[in-house]
Amino acid sequence: MHEDDVLGKAYDGRLMRRLLGYLRPYRRQVVIAVAAIIGHSSLELAPPYLTKMAIDLYIPARDVAGLGLLAAVYLVTLVGAFILEYVQTWTMQATGQRIMFDMRMQMVEHLQRLDLRFYDRNPVGRLMTRVTTDVDALNDLFTSGVVSVFGDMFTLVGIMGVLVWMDWRLALVAFSVLPLIALITQWFRINVRGTYREVRMWIARINAYLQERITGMSTVQLYRREQLDFAAFDEIDRQHRDANLRSIFYYAAFYPGVELVSALAAALILWVGGGWVVNGDGLTLGALVAFLQYSQRFFRPISDLSEKFNLLQGAMASSERIFALLDTPVDITSPAPRGGPSGAPEPARPPQPIGTIRFENVTFSYVAGEPVLRNVSFEVHPGQRVAIVGATGSGKTTIVSLLLRFYDVQQGRITIDGVDIRDLDLAVLRRQFGLVLQDVYLFSGTIGGNVRLGESSITDEDVRRALDAVHASRFVDRLPHGVNTAVTERGATLSSGQKQLLSFARALAFNPNVLILDEATSSVDTDTEMLIRDALKVVMRGRTTMAIAHRLSTIQDMDRILVLHKGELRESGTHQELLAARGIYHRLYQLQFESNAALQS
């Protein structure tokens, strides 16, 4: 089943204990809120009884002074209740915001550590729902549910105790409608639970659908899918609307139903209690009025508790999904320090500068039983320039992903100077590499910010040198604010070639030991490619370089060329050696040469 379709239990003690753990850092605030709630509930019990005293004692005695004193006490009670409610509301709302902050930070930190295999199988829209909508549901639980439920329970018990103390006979009359309340509440809970599940499910699907379509809007417009995609979204949105309408129906029926039962209780109190007052059967008029006021206050927390059941239901469903995310194991990590929980050796550090890179009988598959690489073995020596070529799907980019430990090999191993990269500190390992991808990703911010990516050690002069090295300063200097020019999301205001140049500048600014180019010149025109190739001759000098390329013209002067075919390393050598062998590389070269000749003619 789709994970958003699963509702879970209405109450799960294990999940609740884990949720309450987020309150531990704010124990003092919780104690203050609970004290304020209990104090507020206690003061709420006073006004009806003060009314009884006024009617039974001071009004018949025409005691104006006593009435004035009683009114002052009434006013103080209301002001005190207001202050306590303000303290409780402010404290719990502030605490809820802090817990949301803590939880979102924990989730984002965990998302940053999860390997790319996790993102291969989880849509971005669904993950966005976890961090936003699901956390909001837990905020409602902390601010309006966990603590304030004590106030509702205290109010109910307090009112029941006062009613029994005032007149147990009339209290039984008032309580006689409770079975009706139980039936209405049970009906509401059963039905609203299903609609709540549907609402949460459809909002997650709305988020996932919109994220995918907005990201791919150029494809949608190019292939004229606007009407088809709009119709698909219309169906998803309609389902979400209808689920909300069904939920509204149950709410619309529940609250008037509770009010109707409350009115029935008031009618019974008036009928039975009024008769006792008229007949002088041990009940005063003031007590009758107080009973009516208490009965109105009695049913309000019952409605609130039913609403809190809905909050609890949503929180259980959301927390189950959030904790499922947080419990997703991080498969690719640095070895634990010596003496740590796992007892693993302390992570080794790559040599400086980085030494020989060796793939030893590496086999890897994204899907079980469908290997992308099969027993691949090769070496890259320090300062060597190595190109990797092959048809689409032959495993070229997978080699880079494995070297950077975006994925871990399933068989064989990858070593640097004889040390398995799985034994190296992950952050230190990746810091040795500079990666330029075919699909450049720029973040919203500035030109300079996208080059240094928040690295404080990279100065403005370093950014300028990197831009100059790849000839990116030619277009950057023409921008309104130079390196401080704003960059929109994904660099939408820049051309593909400009983004590619910035990607080169970013890699060079970090001064990596190993430069990895993955189809790095595929998105630039011929003139720009010539500029980059000229700059790379300087940049690659003395630095290990691995380049993945489809256009063989860009890698002819490499020290070594590796030819992949269907996941296997089939050929290795220089450009001239491979042409002389008249194998796969020779055929690829001929195909590209003939294709280029045909285009030129």
Image: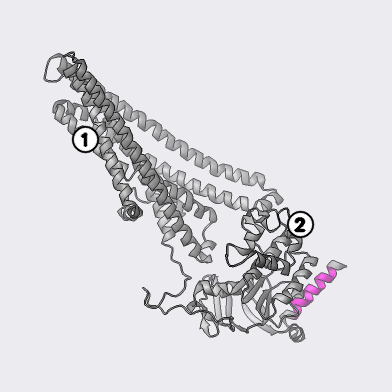
The residue that appears at 75% across and 82% down in the rendered structure is: 575
Task: Provide the residue span drawn in magenta.
Answer: 586-598
- Which of the colour schemes (rainbow, by chain, secondary structure, one colour) is used? one colour
Q: Is residue 304 left or right of residue 510?
A: left
Count of numbered circles on the image: 2
- In this view, 459 is above or below 422: above
Q: Quadrant of residue 544?
A: bottom right
Name the kind of residue labelled 1 in the image.
Gly
Residue 591 painted magenta: yes
Foreground disc of the pair 2, 1: 2
As helix, strand or loop, the secondary structure at mark 2 comes to loop
Q: What predominant SS class does the magenta segment belong to?
A: helix
The residue that appears at 50% across and 55% down in the rendered structure is: 127
The residue to which callout 2 is attached is 478
> Going by the picture, which residue comes out furthest to the right?
601
The residue to which callout 1 is attached is 158
The residue that appears at 75% across and 60% down in the rendered structure is: 475
Q: Quadrant of residue 458?
A: bottom right
